[in-house]
Amino acid sequence: MKHVEAAGTFSTQAAVRSYESGPDGLMKPETVLHWLQEIAEAHASALGFGYDFVMSRGLAWVEVRLDMTIGRRPAWKEVVELRTCTAQASPLQARRNLEIRDAEGNGIIAASCLWAVIDIRRRRPVPLNKYISPFPETPCSEMVAPVRMDIEGLQPEIREWTAEQRDMDFNRHINNAAYLVWALESLPEAWQEEHALTGIHLHFRKESHAGEQMKSLLFRQGNLTCHHIMQGDELRAEAVLEWG
């Protein structure tokens, strides 16, 4: 895997592996999120403010929201290019744009994310330039806009489960990709067979841990589904998914 950095853009090539693919032979939706997290960390480390840098200062990067459009998911063994850039979105948040391109250079997936640096002990965000100076000033305007769904008057379909150890990452909380898996698992199999996932919009509210009793409130309207991932009465994450 080769990394290239030029004019504020960081890129790498990768092939879709068998265990990253689903029964349809395409990359699993959650794998896309894993890939984007990996290139985000690689780029941040190359710029000098990755995982090791922030952890040495009692800090951590946390993803606040993710907005993604999917033209198509790459197939098993397909080689694609991942490209990313980052810049300050506000004093407390960094925007990161990510794109996956096929061998012909066509964009097949695009995403915009917001990240914050938090003080691990206080669990509060800190100004980016307090520890990272100067933060990249390369223009990084939003590639994908958020999508919201009006759920007023809609009755939810409810599913309950227990968060498991396998969903945890090395930060000892539930990995962000698990929220997408949970949202997808709340949908009937027939729905997913009849529809293609074309957009993912995730808003992360608060971290979750293994052993917690979780609940999904699913709302459906047209080509949108809205998923409130709850722990008790507390909203931990909200997902709005677009379908074709």
Image (spheres, grey):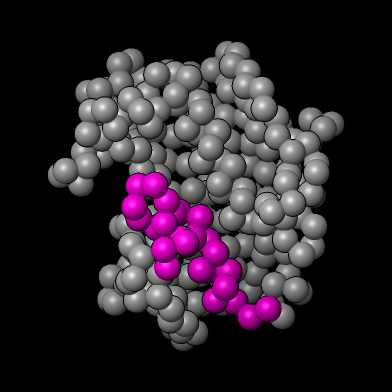
The foreground one among 208 and 191 is 208
Position of the N terminus, as image quadrant, is top right
Q: Position of residue 169 (x, y in %)?
A: 42, 51
Is 162 displayed left or right of 7 in the figure? left
Q: Is residue 76 above or below residue 43?
A: below
Position of the C terminus, as image quadrant, is bottom right
Is 198 displayed left or right of 45 in the figure? right
Q: Is residue 147 above or below residue 231?
A: above
Q: Position of residue 193 (x, y in %)?
A: 75, 73
Is 7 displayed left or right of 24 in the figure? left
Q: Is residue 83 visible?
A: yes
Residue at image position (61%, 51%) is 31
The foreground one among 197 and 176 is 176
The foreground one among 113 and 30 is 30
Q: Position of residue 120 (x, y in %)?
A: 22, 42
Residue situated furthest front in the rendering: 165
Q: Is residue 205 magenta?
A: no
Q: Is residue 97 visible?
A: no
Residue at image position (34%, 76%) is 213
Residue at image position (59%, 76%) is 187
Q: Is residue 187 magenta?
A: yes
Q: Quadrant of residue 3?
A: top right
Q: Quadrant of residue 114?
A: top left
Residue at image position (82%, 32%) is 103
The foreground one among 120 and 110 is 120
Residue situated furthest right in the rendering: 104
Q: Quadrant of residue 99?
A: top right
Q: Position of residue 204 (x, y in %)?
A: 38, 55
Q: Which residues are magenta?
A: 164-189
